[in-house]
Image: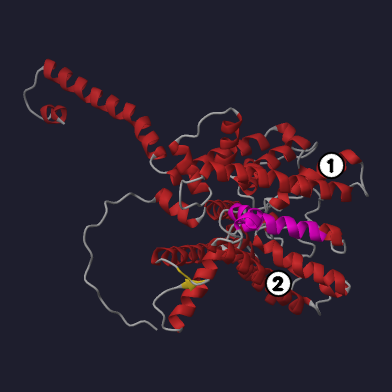
């Protein structure tokens, strides 16, 4: 500062100019050298921020690998935007695709996508902890904090033990699903190809990713009348959407003889949405000649239950979403918005948030001061969190739908369906994904990323830490309703 002051004076010496210039240059060099340290401090300041940056880094690496010439099939090409879109969709376990996965990518490209699905489904910190445990390296406190954030746990107690369970349950269910699919595919293709298809779809569907290798964007439409494929897919989807904490609770139920409140809420809401959703879809589509009209009664039931389970975040389907009635399409939008359960591979506002909102509405209507679930009173902070997540999610979907309505030349229902599917990381589409403009692709990528990270984690990652308030404002009253 003194350098600029002296420079403006009428009389100054060469020595003073040099001295002030050196001090100014030293100041700049100190600021520049401090930038990496400040960036690292910002990066490590919170587990949420570390989680967000880690996801971005892996998505970038995946896009770079998919852009390699040998990642695409012979005679095919892939733009950088499409490579980023595919990487985001795989890492965020969504399943929306701008190019056909089965025919556009090579075997190497398929394995890159499958790796991104596995890392995105379990969480990169879970996979990192797996290698740390394999190498017998101690998991640090900072890593435990990030694990707590990624698994959506309220306590650090037993977090590494939970990670071991997550890895064991995930690999066991994926292996079982892959084996079932392989046995089915062996009836129509060679053993090597059947094993390849079985592993890919077992991992993809359990992680609720929705990627498939069947080609022509037809998902599982060839298996609409196949009970084995439908039942295996439904079981994998439900196991992936319940959450690893609930799976651990169910496995330990014979020993503990009781379920936790979280597991009771998740299982109850999941059952209600699954059975109730199937009933509504069956009623709406029963007389639709383009969908259920071409199936017999048993196949109609299979289709109803599969399309009630797949909005949990799976993205696989045996019917064309565009052929469904608008009432069914809007109902599936609602199911996608609710999504899966906390600590699972799925997205949405989560079944527990929806249950808390219903309980809060019931408490207000009955004039009760407390929100109660299964004879347990919920603390006020959990109710506020559910309201925040729902409002943030609703605002995000509505805003994205309005923007896509401007950038894309498509019917409103297709735009709303696409935006909700991306945010809830579902992967179902009415055919708009392949026709998106560059601006639309970028917006859908952003929606998938926000939906996978979660509104709560993202808000903590972007927020500035404030000092604890030592005072409260005076109470005011407004008229509501």
| Residue drawn at point x = 29 percent, y = 51 percent | 466
Q: Residue at x 75, y 68 (%)?
A: 305
Q: Nearer the viewer, residue 360 or 247?
A: 247
Q: Which residues are magenta?
A: 230-256
Q: Secondary structure at mark 1?
A: helix
Which quadrant of the view contains residue 344? Answer: bottom right
Q: Position of residue 310 (x, y in %)?
A: 70, 62
Q: Position of residue 457 (x, y in %)?
A: 47, 52
Q: What colour scheme was applied to this rendering of the protein?
A: secondary structure
Residue 83 visible within the image: no
Judged from this view, the residue extending furthest toward the left is 11
- What percent of the width, then of the height, locates residue 326? 69, 75
Q: Residues within 10 Å of mark 1 (few under 14, many from 20)?
A: many
Q: Horizontally, is 319 left or right of 133 in the view? A: right
Q: Quadrant of residue 217?
A: bottom right
Give yes or no for contact between labels 2 and 1 (Cβ–Cβ under 8 Å). Answer: no
Q: Is residue 348 magenta?
A: no
Q: Nearer the viewer, residue 134 or 194?
A: 134
Give the quadrant of residue 426: bottom right
Q: Residue at x 75, y 79 (%)?
A: 283
Q: Which residue is mark 2?
A: 275
Can you tell which of label 2 and label 1 is closer to the viewer?
2
Q: Secondary structure at mark 2?
A: helix
Residue highlighted by disc 1: 195
């Amino acid at each position: 500062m003194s350098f600029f002051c002296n420079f403006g004076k009428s009389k100054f010496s060469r020595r003073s100019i040099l001295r002030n210039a050196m001090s100014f240059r030293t100041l700049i060099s100190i600021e520049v050298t401090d930038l990496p340290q400040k960036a690292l401090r910002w990066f490590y300041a919170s587990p949420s921020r570390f989680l967000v940056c880690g996801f971005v880094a892996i998505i970038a690496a995946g896009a770079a690998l998919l852009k390699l010439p040998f990642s695409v099939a012979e005679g095919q090409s892939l733009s950088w935007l499409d490579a980023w879109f595919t990487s985001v969709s795989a890492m965020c376990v969504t399943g929306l695709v701008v190019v056909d996965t089965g025919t556009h990518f090579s075997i190497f490209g398929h394995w890159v996508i499958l790796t991104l699905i596995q890392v995105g489904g379990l969480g990169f910190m879970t996979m990192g902890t797996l290698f740390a445990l394999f190498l017998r390296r101690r998991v640090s406190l900072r890593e435990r904090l990030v694990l707590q954030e990624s698994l959506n746990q309220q306590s650090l107690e037993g977090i590494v033990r939970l990670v071991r369970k997550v890895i064991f349950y995930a690999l066991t269910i994926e292996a079982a699903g892959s084996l079932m699919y392989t046995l089915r595919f062996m009836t129509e293709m060679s053993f090597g190809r059947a094993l390849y298809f079985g592993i890919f779809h077992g991992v993809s569907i359990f992680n609720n990713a929705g990627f498939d290798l069947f080609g022509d964007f037809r998902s599982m439409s060839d298996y609409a009348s196949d009970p084995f494929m439908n039942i295996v897919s439904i079981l994998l989807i439900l196991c992936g959407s319940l959450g690893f904490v609930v799976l651990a609770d169910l496995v330990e139920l014979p020993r503990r003889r009781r379920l936790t409140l979280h597991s009771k809420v998740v299982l109850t809401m999941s059952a209600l949405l699954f059975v109730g959703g199937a009933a509504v879809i069956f009623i709406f589509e029963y007389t639709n000649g383009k969908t259920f009209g071409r199936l017999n009664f048993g196949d109609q039931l299979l289709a109803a239950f599969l399309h009630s389970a797949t909005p949990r975040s799976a993205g696989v389907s045996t019917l064309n979403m565009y052929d469904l009635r608008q009432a069914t399409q809007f109902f599936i939008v609602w199911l996608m918005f609710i999504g899966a359960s906390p600590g699972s591979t799925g997205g949405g506002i989560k079944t527990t948030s929806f249950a808390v909102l219903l309980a809060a509405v019931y408490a207000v209507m009955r004039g009760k001061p407390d929100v109660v679930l299964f004879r347990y009173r919920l603390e006020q902070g959990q109710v506020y969190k559910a309201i925040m997540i729902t409002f943030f999610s609703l605002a995000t979907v509505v805003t994205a739908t309005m923007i896509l309505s401007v950038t894309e030349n498509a019917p409103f229902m297709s735009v709303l369906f696409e935006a909700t599917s991306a945010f809830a990381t579902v992967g179902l589409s009415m055919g708009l994904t392949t026709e998106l403009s560059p601006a639309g692709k970028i917006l859908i990528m952003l929606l998938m990323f926000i939906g996978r990270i979660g509104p709560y984690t993202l808000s903590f990652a972007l927020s500035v830490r404030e000092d604890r308030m030592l005072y409260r404002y005076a109470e005011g009253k407004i008229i509501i309703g």
